Image (cartoon, rainbow, N blue to C red):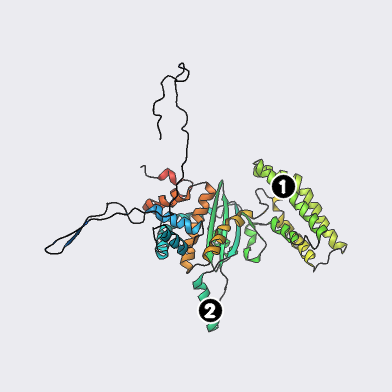
Amino acid sequence: MCRHETLAAGQRCPACGRGTLYPLPAGVEIRIDGHALLSAVRYELEKLRCSACGAVFTAPAPAGAEKYSPRAKAVIALGRYYLGLPFYRLEQYQALVGVPVADATQWDLAERVADCAYPVFDRLWELAAQGEVIFQDDTHVRILALLAENRRADATGETLERRGMFTTGLVVRVEKRVICLYRSGRAHAGDNLTALLARREPELAKPIVMSDALAANQRDDDDTLIRCHCLAHGRRQFADLDEVFPAEAHHVIAVLNQVFAHEAVTRDRALSAAERLAYHQTRSGPLLEGLHDWLEQQFQDRRVEPNSSLGKAFTYLLARWETLTQFLRVEGAPVDSNAVERALKLIIRQRKNSLFHATAHGAYVAGILTSLIATCVQAGVNALDYLVALQIHRHAVFRQPAAWLPWNYQENLTPA
């Protein structure tokens, strides 16, 4: 806090001489400096040697400070799992600015952060299982240990139940909160959704689940949930055909664009779930009903070859019409799966920069830290401060994880 050099509250105004000065909220001026992601303090320890016996006496380092602070560990975790910086690249950068930290050391420090955070990660899964709306999707991941497993199976003739590797993203709305969860391995989105809903309280209403129409996203018992499919994926079928079938594609895209415009209005006006449903039923319902009739009429009049690319795009919409239009019947049903598509960009950023995980454990650590960071972003919480707090209060986190969630942890911080 910078105090005024000559004036204070309660003094006479030097400008007019009549009024009395009173305090206002402080003004803010920011001056920005640059540092390495990891900065260091270098201590030179005095050494003394005895001229007779040769014994060396070294001055002790300052007490109470560990070599890598909780903040340093949190910075490494954010660099790797939010910025997508591979450890070897951060190692090179730190050496360039004079504070070298080996990539193996960085992994060890990030793993320690995850060790402090996994009770909260498990608690987030428990909370997400009770959510009202769940978005799910997969993206590919490379895990070297599982790739080696595939090669051994090829060499020995062993049959693996599944050879693929996936990172599942689950974005869950729980009351007014949004939780982002990631899990990597052989399981795809349908498997991970099943694992999530196995922890759901049985008396709760069916959750709304939004995804694209890939089979990997489905479950055998989809009757236990309200399945929605992404209308943006349906629109994309026609956007890809715009040059080949411009008239038909333009008609479908124009109708769907109006539906998305109505959805934007509901967000801008912050309509409640019931108001949003009524708005879509009034504005979007007639548009989609007309589109459905038009699609069927094209087949009946034999204007579209069913096996052509255009016919397959028509069939995609008609075969999934009920799940694509759940927002016309179910309060809170989303129109598209953009929420989880955006959430998976964190994983794609990591994959493009770091290419792979060495082991399944490394992928698990990535899932923990990426989930906590992404949930902090959704909650508007400073992820760096949060990861530091989890390390400092590790014992309290293990005793009561529910008190150390991104949106309530500050209530439990020990006063400075």
Specify few, some or many for label 2: CA neighbours under 10 Å numbering under 14, 14-19, or 20 or more.
few
Which residue in the rendered view is the most extreme toward the top? 18
Toward the viewer: 120 or 400?
Answer: 120
Three-letter amino acid code at the position of disc 2:
Arg
Residue 98 is left or right of residue 158, and the answer is left
Give residue 11's position: percent from left, percent from top.
Answer: 41, 21
Give residue 10's position: percent from left, percent from top.
Answer: 41, 21
- State whether residue 345 is above or below residue 12: below
For the question of whether residue 123 can be seen, the reply is yes
Which residue in the rendered view is the most extreme toward the bottom? 156
Q: Are marks 2 and 1 in contact (CB under 8 Å)?
A: no
Q: What quarter of the picture does the C terminus occupy?
A: top left
Specify few, some or many for label 1: CA neighbours under 10 Å numbering under 14, 14-19, or 20 or more.
few
Give residue 120's position: percent from left, percent from top.
Answer: 45, 54
Q: CA distance from mark 2 to mark 1?
A: 49 Å
Residue under label 2, please give it.
151
Q: Which mark is residue 232?
A: none
Which residue in the rendered view is the most extreme toward the right? 301
Residue under label 1, please give it.
261
Toward the viewer: 382 or 305?
Answer: 382
Give the quarter of the image for residue 211.
bottom right
Residue 368 is left or right of residue 57, and the answer is right
Residue 261 is left or right of residue 245, and the answer is left
For the question of whether residue 219 can be seen, the reply is no
**Dot placed on the residue nearer the N-terminal end, 2 or 1:** 2
Identify the residue at horizontal 49%, vertical 58% (top origin).
81
Give the quarter of the image for residue 59.
bottom left
Q: Secondary structure at mark 2?
A: helix
Q: What quarter of the picture does the N terminus occupy?
A: top left
